[in-house]
Amino acid sequence: MLPLLAAAQKNAFERFYDSYSGKEGYTTVFVTGDMIKLIRKDLSGGTGGIESVRVVTQQPPTDDFVERVKGILEAENYKLMSSVSSGPKQISVYMRETSSGKGRRSDCITLISGGKDNVVMNIVGDFDITKLSDLGIKTE
């Protein structure tokens, strides 16, 4: 019963991530906030609240993968923050912020498509999107 309850509490991107984990043609990466802090002890307050980073890479790329990500972005009310196109390659950064009894929670999804692979990255926690460059992540 407990595993069913935990699964029911996963957000749309976590379910998306789980559906590709371990499958041929996909690489999945999960990093906890504690691991990020361990690696980057010099993090400022703007990124110190990151809870997790999930990445899914698909090779070779397919349109249905990108459409599935876009469906999550639309259904979960993410806002487009930045978009860069270079030939067929598209890089888009989406953001959603929510508040709860635990405080502010930021949820950032970056989608890279149109190249030799598709990549989607999700960063979750209490962080300032303008400080993601502290982690080596460019948002512009």
Image (tube, grey):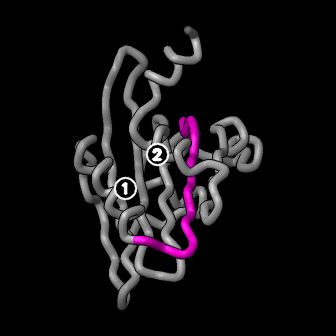
- Image coords of residue 20 (percent x, y): 56, 51
Q: From this view, report whether residue 34 is shown above or below residue 116.
A: above
Q: Report the front residue among 3 and 11.
A: 3
On the picture, is 118 further left or further right than 42? left
Q: Which residue is mark 2?
A: 16
* Label 1 with label 2: CB-CB less than 8 Å: yes
Q: Residue at x 41, y 62 (%)?
A: 65
Q: Which residues are magenta?
A: 49-62
Question: Please, what is the three-letter code of the amino acid marked with disc 1?
Answer: Val
On the picture, is 63 further left or further right than 6? left
Is residue 52 a member of the stretch shown in magenta?
A: yes
- Image coords of residue 125 (percent x, y): 48, 36
Q: Which residue is mark 1?
A: 69
Q: From this view, report whether residue 6 is shown above or below residue 63.
A: above
Question: Please, what is the three-letter code of the amino acid marked with disc 2?
Answer: Phe
Say which element carries label 2. helix
Q: Residue furthest right?
A: 38
Q: Residue at x 43, y 60 (%)?
A: 110
On the picture, is 9 further left or further right than 75? right
On the picture, is 12 further left or further right than 132? left
Q: Report the front residue among 51 and 29.
A: 29
Say which element carries label 1. helix
Is residue 8 a member of the stretch shown in magenta?
A: no
Q: Residue at x 46, y 45 (%)?
A: 16
- Image coords of residue 62 (percent x, y): 43, 71
- Disc on the earlier residue, 1 or 2: 2
Q: Residue at x 26, y 58 (%)?
A: 80
Q: Report the front residue among 135 and 52.
A: 52
Question: Tag 1: Cα neighbours inside 10 Å, few (<14), some, or many (≥20)?
Answer: some
- Image coords of residue 10 (percent x, y): 46, 29
Disc 1 to disc 2, how far (Cα)? 8 Å
